[in-house]
Amino acid sequence: MKVLIAQKCGFCHGVRNAIRVANQTLEDEHDVYCLGPIIHNKDMVDQLSQNGLKTVSTADEILSGTVLIRSHGAAPKQIAKLKEKGLNIIDATCVLVKRVQHIASEFEKEGYKAVIIGEEDHPEVKAVVGCAKDVIVITEESDIDKLPKHTKLGIVCQTTQSPEHFGKMLGAIGQCDFSELKVINTLCNEAIKRQESAVELCKQVDIMFVLGGLESANTKRLAELCKTVNQQTYHLQNWKELDKTLISGKITAGVTAGASTPDWIIDEFVNNLEKM
Ligand code: SF4
């Protein structure tokens, strides 16, 4: 089978840094914990777990040792709680995620009601919500009613949303009854480049595979965008998940991967697909 790979896919600098920090910490320290999966990729998390990283869901589960703050960040209150326990904190939050947190807290100081466009349950968004009092999360246009009237609104966006969605939401917010609007573009360029090259590639192929964690926001976004252009788009975590009947009769396949998908997952998938 002919396999084409998206020009930009796989690890971004934020994820690469988080994995580097995790590996270094595992070499230097014993008893290393991560509050939630360090990145949204089960294969990578399993590999780090084999090297000793313990992933827990709450700070209460950690009594001693070192805690890694994952690439999606953590709310200041959560970090303070860990510090109170005397734990050693290593921060692997992506700098672009840190920027969103900083902007939300600055909005509050400047008298704006901070609003983030994103997924309420996503850890990045939850951490931003924890950076200022009463941050409003809006996901779809139907959430616009949540915005208070006659207020100064400060808008940011979850880093991995698409520019199209950001633009659509800004259009809807623009029709609201606000007194002042301040918008800061917090979209991640790495995510945008992956979206653009995925969409470009899926126009040229019979079938498109998007590789990455099922919880990964940026991978899900890639799959959603590709699906709008090529109905034959499939989001898989790795080669083992491929239903081989899908490629029957297909000549050219495209492969892309989210920013949290390690190279070995992409290489294994492409090598096996080429042999089909
Ligand atoms: S996708 Fe962008 S914001 Fe998210 S970790 Fe990577 S570089 Fe950071």
Image: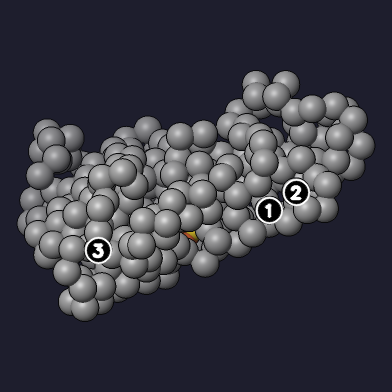
Q: Quadrant of residue 19?
A: bottom left
Q: Residues within 10 Å of mark 3 (few under 14, many from 20)?
A: some
> From mark 1 to mark 2, how far is it between C-alphas?
5 Å
Q: Quadrant of residue 208?
A: top left
Q: Which residue is mark 3?
A: 65
For residue 89, side relative to residue 176 (left or right): left
Residue 149 position, x and y percent, is 85, 27
**In the image shown, does 116 or 252 lie closer to the viewer?**
116
Amino acid type of the residue that numbered disc 2 sits on in the rendered structure: Glu
Q: Residue at x 8, y 51 (%)?
A: 276
- How many callouts does the rendering have? 3
Work out whether residue 116 can be spotted.
yes
Residue 185 position, x and y percent, is 68, 55
- Name the N-terminal-most of marks 2 and 3: 3
Task: Identify the mark at residue 212; answer none if there is no mark.
Answer: none
Q: Which residue is mark 2?
A: 108
> From mark 1 to mark 3, how far is it between C-alphas?
30 Å
Q: Which residue is mark 1?
A: 105
Residue 33 position, x and y percent, is 25, 57
Q: Is residue 106 above or below residue 158?
A: below
In this view, the mark in front (2 or 3): 3
For residue 69, side relative to residue 206 (left or right): right
